[in-house]
Image: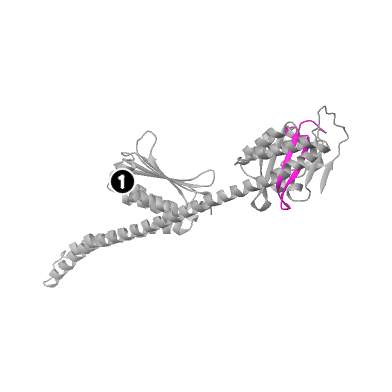
Amino acid sequence: MTTVAKSTRRATRARTLPGAEAVFGHLLRISRALAGRLDFQAAIQSVSAELGDVLPHDHLDVCLLESGGHIHAAYEAGLHTDWSLTPHPVPVSGSPIRSILLGETHLMVTGDATQDPRFRFAGAFNHPIFDQNLRSRIHAALLVRGEVIGAFSCSKHDADFYGEDDVTLARHVAEVLAPYFYALRAAEDARRLAIEEAEGRAREEGLREGALRLTEELERERQRIGMDLHDQTLADLTRIVRRLETLREGPVEPGSLSPAIDGLHRCVDELRRIIDDARPNVLELFGFAEGVEDFLGRALHDSGIAWRLEDESDGRVDALDPALRIALFRIVQEAVNNAARHAEPSLIEVGVAIRQDGALRIEVRDDGAGFAPMPQRRRVGGIRNMQTRARLISADFFLDRQPGGQGTLMSLVLPAKGAAR
């Protein structure tokens, strides 16, 4: 399973090749150098330092398969290229040494990779070969129990540099490296899994706590509605009933029903307000922007606070799931109410927009007294409710003083996957 590209040129090298005993000594030193190296980059650097005398190279790397063998990540010594600097793992289908990573061969040797057709194919991630002039190259599979877990590679700028002895040494080095890098990969996978499990448990705990807070808030809201009905609407209706009972006892004078009729109109208006607060009908009937605009007009009426709404979302909010749309509305509602009650602002602004990355951004700004640090706040229930609602819809929530310390900024960002149509 060896593929070697023969060059028409003969290498002219003035270097002494190591004997078997020297090679064995270097392999032992490589094993000792690897001991205690707990990350891939430190391991490949130690291998490069030990190999310099017996297997000269301008570039050394180990690439390891990940995610079931579909992608791989590279770790380099000497020259550093896009093979390791690219932030995301590279698909195996685009690797110049995909033949090794796919198990089709265990060895690839070339005297000039810039001319070798095996390294040039449609979609190949091979530009580091040409950018860094990596001509002579040896690639040996990293095998563990017969399974390919990656590849060891060394390269020189000079063409036709490596001979058969170099190839043999590279294969021995790959045999030494394979179990160590396999163990490192297993440890990294276990560490990543432990972190993911811990984050998952934290998210679940946060959601449980959030659900409890929302339940408490719903109970408080139910009690508030009950008190509104009792203190205002029920009291008005009681007065109207008494007025009508008085009129029933004698003749009805012209105009005597007017106070009762006016009182009934007030009751209807008050009931409509309570119902709209509990269920934002304008939001459901006409859309998010209209619902927010209607709420701002009602909430800030006669307060002396000016308000402004800027909607640059092109109606994207209205394409969201109704439950998600209502959650966003409730967060805006809470932010506006907090500003109006506690910040004494002269202006409250609400902005809705779509960012360049497709995420939905909603901001509520005011020019009021600012934002008190957590220990100084008397009430934090409203802020926690906003945080909880944001967490439940996987949105990023931010609340702080505006630049310059004048007023408060509430910012909510719903990622593109949540804001998609």
Which x, y percent locates residue 44?
66, 38
Residue range highlighted in magenta: 131-159
Q: Which residue is situated farthest in the front direction here?
A: 21
Residue furthest to the bottom in view is 249
The part of the image, by quadrant, that contains residue 351 is: top left
Q: Residue furthest right?
A: 8
Q: Is residue 390 left or right of residue 47?
A: left
Residue, x 19% and y 64% (percent of image)? 260
Q: Secondary structure at mark 1?
A: helix
Residue 90 visible in the snapshot: no
Where does the image place residue 407, in percent across and percent down from the top left? Answer: 35, 38
Q: Give percent across and percent down for residue 139.
A: 76, 42
What residue do we see at 72% from left, 39% from top? Answer: 27
Decide: is 314 above or below 130.
below
Q: Nearer the viewer, residue 401 or 13?
A: 13
How is the model colour-coded?
Answer: one colour
Is residue 139 on the magenta stretch? yes
Judged left or right of residue 260, residue 198 is right
Kindly indicate the quadrant of the structure image that contains residue 275: bottom left
Q: Amino acid at mark 1?
A: Ala
Magenta run includes residue 238:
no
Say left or right for 102 vs 234.
Answer: right
Specify the farthest residue to the top.
14
Residue located at (77% from left, 39% from top): 169
Magenta part mainly helix, strand or loop? strand
Q: Which residue is mark 1?
A: 340
Residue 344 vs residue 417, the one in the foreground:
417
Rendered location of residue 201, percent (x, y): 47, 54
Q: Nearer the viewer, residue 165 or 313?
A: 165
Question: Mark 1 packing: few (<14 Cα in 10 Å), some, or many (20+)?
Answer: many
Q: Is residue 379 visible?
A: yes
Count every numbered label the image shows and give the total.
Answer: 1
